[in-house]
Image (cartoon, rainbow, N blue to C red):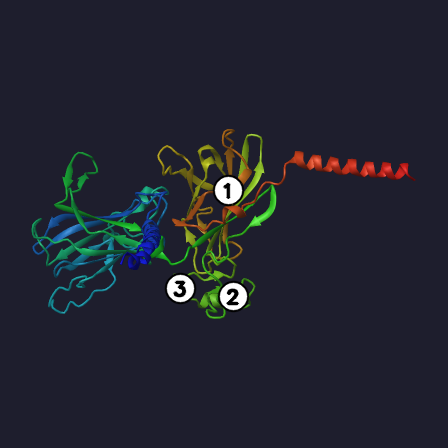
Amino acid sequence: MGFLFLPMIRSVPKFVSFATLLVFVLSCTSTFIATEAYDPLDPNGNITIKWDILSWTTDGYVASVTLFNFQKYRHIQAPGWSLGWTWAKKEVIWNMVGGQATEQGDCSRFKTTLPHCCKKTPTIVDLLPGTPYNQQYTNCCKGGVLSSWVQDPEKAVGSFQISVGQAGTTNKTVRLPKNFTLNTPGPGYTCARAKVVKPTKFISPDKRRVTQAMMTWNVTCTYSQILAQKTPTCCVSLSSFYNDTIVPCPKCSCGCQRNATHPGSCVEPDSPYLASVVSASNKNSYTPLVRCTKHMCPIRVHWHVKVNYKQYWRVKVTVTNFNYRMNYSDWNMVVQHPNFDNLTQSFSYNYKSITPYATINDTGMLWGIKFYNDILMQAGPLGNVQSELLFRKDEATFTFDKGWAFPRRVYFNGDNCVMPPPDAYPWLPNSGFRQYVSLLTLIMTCLSTIAVMYAYA
C-alpha cells in the first residue's frame, strides 16, 4: 500500500517548488504595479484640494475651494485642470466666482431663479486670463495652469468661490461630496475621500485679526504615470568627447512606427504634406503627433559630456521636441547624478536642488529662463532648448570610467524618461600608455625586420 503513495510523495517537492515560484512571480508583478505610482524623487508630492465653508446661507453655504500643487516638479499646463465630484444629496450650485461649471444640467424644477449648475456630478474649470474683475477670485483666472512648487510656489495655487444650495446649514447636517476626480486635462490623478480637518484660519491683510472657516475638509490627489498614458513620453540619448559613439534612445521607447496599420501615427519631416497634416490635426486632441523616429517619443533629452578640465568638467544638455501638436510652456527637467552636489554653474537653465533623500544632494531640477527659453516650441527648427552645466570634480568620486558621467535618471515634466541600457553607454577608449606600448612594439618589430633583411642581403 505504501508503494501506491510513493509517486505522490515524490511529486510533493516539485509541486511545492512550483507553487513557491508562482507566488514569487505574482508578488513581484503586484509589487511592480503598485510601486509605479510611487515617485522616489518626490515621495510626498500631491495636489491637495481644500474646501473651506466661509458662511452659512438659508439653504446651504458659501465655500472657498483651493487647489495646492505640492508636487516639486510636476505642473499642470494649458488647457488646465478640471475638478469634478458627486454630490451626497440633491445639492445645486447657485453661483460661482473665479470658476465655472462646464454644464448647467437639468434645472427645470426651478421656476424663478435658475442655479448655475444642477448636475449631480458637476465639472468645474478655471476662468481664463482677462476675466472681468467682478468675476475674479483670489488665485483664479489662470486658465487652469498651475506651476510646480519648486518653479513658482505662488503660481502653484488656484481657487474659486462656490455658493451651494439645498445642502446642510450646520456642521452636523452638511454632507461631504464624494468621488472626486481631477483631470489635467487627461487622466493620471487618483483622489482620496474627503476628510474633515481643523478649520482653516485666515489672517487679515493688516495681520491684526484672525478668522476661521466654519468647517474644512481636504481631498488629496496623487499622480500615476501609468494612469496618465500607456507608453512613456520621453527618452534619453548619450554621447561624449572621448568616444565617437552616439548612443541613441532605445528603439520603440515610446512606441513603434505602424504606418501600415496607423498611417497617421507619425509624420516625416521632409514630407510635402507636413503643413497640411499638422494644420488639419485635431487641435483638441492631446495625443502627440510626432516626427517619425526609431524611438517615437515626443521628447528627447540628449546628454553630451563635452569638455574635461583639470578641476571641472562640462556637459551640454539639449531637449528636443518631436511633437507637432504641442508647445511645452514652463517645461522642466529633473536629472539625478552624483556630481550635482558640486554643480558650479548652469548657463541657460534655472537650477535648484530638490534633495529627495534628505542629506544626499544628487538630484537637480532644471527649467527655462522666463522670456528666453521657458517655452519649448513644437517640432521643427525651433523645437529645442539647450544649455551647458559646469561641474566641479570631487577627487574621491570623479571618473569617466564605466559610464559614471551619465545621469542615473531623467524626468521631463514629471514623467520618467527611458534610458539606454548601461552596457550601451560610451566607454573610455584604451589608455594612452597601452597605445604607446603597442606603437613602440610595432616600431621595434619593423626595425628588427629591416636589420635582418639587411644582414642577409
Residue 177 visible at all: yes
Quadrant into which the C terminus falls: top right
Q: Earlier in the sequence, mark 1 or mark 3?
A: 3
Which amino acid is tagged 1?
Answer: Phe
- Find the distance from the CA under tag 3 to the CA under tag 2: 15 Å
Which residue does the image show at 12% across and 45% down from the upper left? 214
* Pointer 1 local density, CA inside 10 Å: few below 14, some 14–19, many at least 20: many
Which amino acid is tagged 3?
Answer: Lys
- Find the distance from the CA under tag 2 to the CA under tag 1: 35 Å
Quadrant into which the N terminus falls: bottom left
Identify the element where label 3 is drawn: loop
* Pointer 3 local density, CA inside 10 Å: few below 14, some 14–19, many at least 20: few
* Pointer 2 local density, CA inside 10 Å: few below 14, some 14–19, many at least 20: some
Which amino acid is tagged 2?
Answer: Leu
Residue marked by disc 1: 406
Q: Where does residue 455 sit, x and y in percent of width and height?
A: 90, 36
182 vs 343, left or right, is: left
Location of residue 311 with respect to 37 vertically, above or below: above
Identify the element where label 2 is drawn: helix
Residue 143 visible at all: no
Indicate which disc residue 274 carries: 2
Residue marked by disc 3: 283
Frontmost of labels 2 and 1 is 1
Residue at the far right: name it: 457
Which residue does the image show at 16% across and 59% down from the upper left? 87
